[in-house]
Image: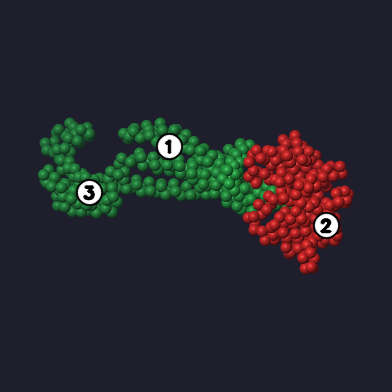
């Protein structure tokens, strides 16, 4: 078959499928809504995860460690120790916060200025602030580092502010897995909905299919409009799902931005990125095609002309 | 064009519809298959249109062995044959034009070509101007002629018709047969199953008489080699 003929046939099948969907608008919209909701749920979870990553992006990587030196240690000693830490593997940055600097910061941020004036000497120790490299920030790495440095005689205590970060990252990990699971389950749902819709459509058009086969329509010819119908369901469902998600994001933007503002963040929730849209639309079209194909493969073979 | 050698057809329910049927139809011939209902006429036509496979014997239609033709080649095979069904097999919810155009659409003909050939076919059966009507708006005879237009629209090499005049008044029946005759005059092979002896006599074409699934008369014209092998 030459390409022009094939293109004509595909165009006919596509237009036929479109026309059929348009002629039963209520049934089409109901089916699209079911598909859209099944697509929107995992997509919404995915959005939640990506937005949480963006919202916390600044500090989820910022695992740091505060090393409090014993009160007798001098700033010079602190500098020497900082140098020693810098030579250790897996360290991104070390800063020395001297006792005097610490007191200035505390006076500035705590609001206890007047009370501090009453003190005759600086009660704060010199502190090393250690930022490990991202690749050396696993729970085990951090724990090892904490114990190594904690064993030094000049060190009073090592405080690791990583616990919540680790928990948070673990939670994101759980959510990500949940997104995947939901995507698989609801994807199967979309497959079933489209497959069943196509099955009903095939049963409705039994006579037409039989006659088409009688006059020499091949299985591929008979199947083609159903495959286009499935793909159109997928595409329409994805479009509706995308609109639902955009509406949800727009609805949440105000409250979430206010909440973020209270935490001193300029974060605003974002809708689906281009790549995520690609996954949503591409995945939905493939699911639609696959659902229709499975259904058509099973049911069309059973329709053989019996004159 | 059509050649049967001791063809038998037994249905899954055990009924033997045809037994050792042999005959030969040459290209461009017009042949009647006659016999009472239940004699096997419809089964014979189903075998020729490859709606059924022969159980035994060898059968060649349009150069293809219908007993062994692969399933995926059946659609292309059917596109070479125009079949007129006793019950029309029209799509009730589609206009006349779409019904007649179906074989052309299936064959992937260009739209202009489809338009031209559908009109030509409708003109031949005297239904030009009724393209936009749906089958229920037509009389039974007109529906039958739509079925004929559909069968001839694809310019098949072989036309097979099962009781095409069964629902027509005698005048119209003769008209339809003349139409078939014209096709055979231009080289199309035509095989018509009918129980209408009047029509057969009127046209004087070769006749094959079936009775209880066997050839019992007429002029089956089996090839000499077949006669020898009996």
Circle 1/circle 3 CB separation < 8 Å: no
Q: CA distance from mark 1 to mark 2?
A: 76 Å
Q: Quarter of the image holding residue A27?
A: top right
Report the disc number at residue B208: 2
Q: CA distance from mark 1 to mark 3?
A: 36 Å
Residue A150 position in % (x across, y down)? 19, 51
For label 3, count other residues whose C-alpha is less than 10 Å away and answer few (under 14), some (14-19) or many (20+).
Answer: some
Report the disc number at residue A91: 3
Q: Secondary structure at mark 3?
A: strand
Q: CA distance from mark 2 to mark 3?
A: 100 Å
Chain identity of mark 2: B
The answer to which of B216 and A127 lies nearer the viewer is B216
Can you identify the residue that label 1 sits on? Answer: A271
Q: Which chain is red?
A: B
Chain identity of mark 3: A
Q: Residue at x 65, y 38 (%)?
A: B112
For marks 1 and 3, the one nearer the N-term is: 3
For label 1, count other residues whose C-alpha is less than 10 Å away and answer few (under 14), some (14-19) or many (20+).
Answer: many
Residue A138 position in % (x across, y down)? 29, 51
């Amino acid at each position: 078959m030459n390409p022009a003929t094939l293109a004509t046939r595909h165009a006919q099948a596509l237009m036929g499928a479109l026309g059929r969907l348009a002629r039963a608008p209520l049934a089409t919209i109901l089916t699209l809504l079911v598909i859209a909701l099944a697509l929107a749920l995992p997509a919404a979870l995915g959005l939640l995860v990506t937005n949480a990553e963006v919202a916390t992006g600044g500090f989820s990587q910022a695992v740091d460690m505060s090393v409090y030196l014993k009160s007798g240690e001098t700033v010079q000693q602190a500098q020497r120790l900082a140098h020693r830490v810098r030579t250790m593997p897996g360290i991104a940055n070390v800063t020395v916060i001297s006792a005097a600097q610490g007191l200035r910061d505390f006076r500035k941020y705590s609001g206890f200025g007047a009370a501090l004036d009453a003190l005759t000497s600086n009660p704060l120790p010199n502190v090393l602030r250690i930022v490990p490299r991202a690749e050396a920030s696993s729970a085990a790495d951090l724990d090892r580092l904490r114990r190594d440095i904690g064993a030094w005689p000049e060190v009073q205590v090592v405080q690791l502010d990583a616990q919540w970060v680790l928990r948070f990252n673990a939670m994101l990990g759980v959510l990500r897995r949940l997104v995947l699971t939901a995507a698989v389950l609801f994807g199967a749902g979309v497959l079933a909905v489209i497959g069943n819709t196509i099955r009903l459509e095939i049963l409705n058009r039994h006579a037409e299919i039989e006659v088409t086969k009688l006059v020499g329509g091949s299985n591929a010819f008979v199947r083609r409009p159903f495959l286009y119908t499935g793909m159109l369901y997928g595409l329409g469902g994805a479009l509706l799902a995308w609109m639902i998600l955009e509406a949800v994001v727009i609805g949440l933007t105000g409250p979430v931005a206010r909440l973020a503002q209270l935490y001193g963040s300029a974060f605003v929730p974002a809708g689906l990125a281009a790549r995520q849209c690609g996954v949503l639309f591409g995945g939905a079209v493939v699911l639609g095609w696959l659902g229709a194909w499975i259904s058509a493969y099973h049911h069309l073979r059973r329709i053989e002309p019996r004159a | 064009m059509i050649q049967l050698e001791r063809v038998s057809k037994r249905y899954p329910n055990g009924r033997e519809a045809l037994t050792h049927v042999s005959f030969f139809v040459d290209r461009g011939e017009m042949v009647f298959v006659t016999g009472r209902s239940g004699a096997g006429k419809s089964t014979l036509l189903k075998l020729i249109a490859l709606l059924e496979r022969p159980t035994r014997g060898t059968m060649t239609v349009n150069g293809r062995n219908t007993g062994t033709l692969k399933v995926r080649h059946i659609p292309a095979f059917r596109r070479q044959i125009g079949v007129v069904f006793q019950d029309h097999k029209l799509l009730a919810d589609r206009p006349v034009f779409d019904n007649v155009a179906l074989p052309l659409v299936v064959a992937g003909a260009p739209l202009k070509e489809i338009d031209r050939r559908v009109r030509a076919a409708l003109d031949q059966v005297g239904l030009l101007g009724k393209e936009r009507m749906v089958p229920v708006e037509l009389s039974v005879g007109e529906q039958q002629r739509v079925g004929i237009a559909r069968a001839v629209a694809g310019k098949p090499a072989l036309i097979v018709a099962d009781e095409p005049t069964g629902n027509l008044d005698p005048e119209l029946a003769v008209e339809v047969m003349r139409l078939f005759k014209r096709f055979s005059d231009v080289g199309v092979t035509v095989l018509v199953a009918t129980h209408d002896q009047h029509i057969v006599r009127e046209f004087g074409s070769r006749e094959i008489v079936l009775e209880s699934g066997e050839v019992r008369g007429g002029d089956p014209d089996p090839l000499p080699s077949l006669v020898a092998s009996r």
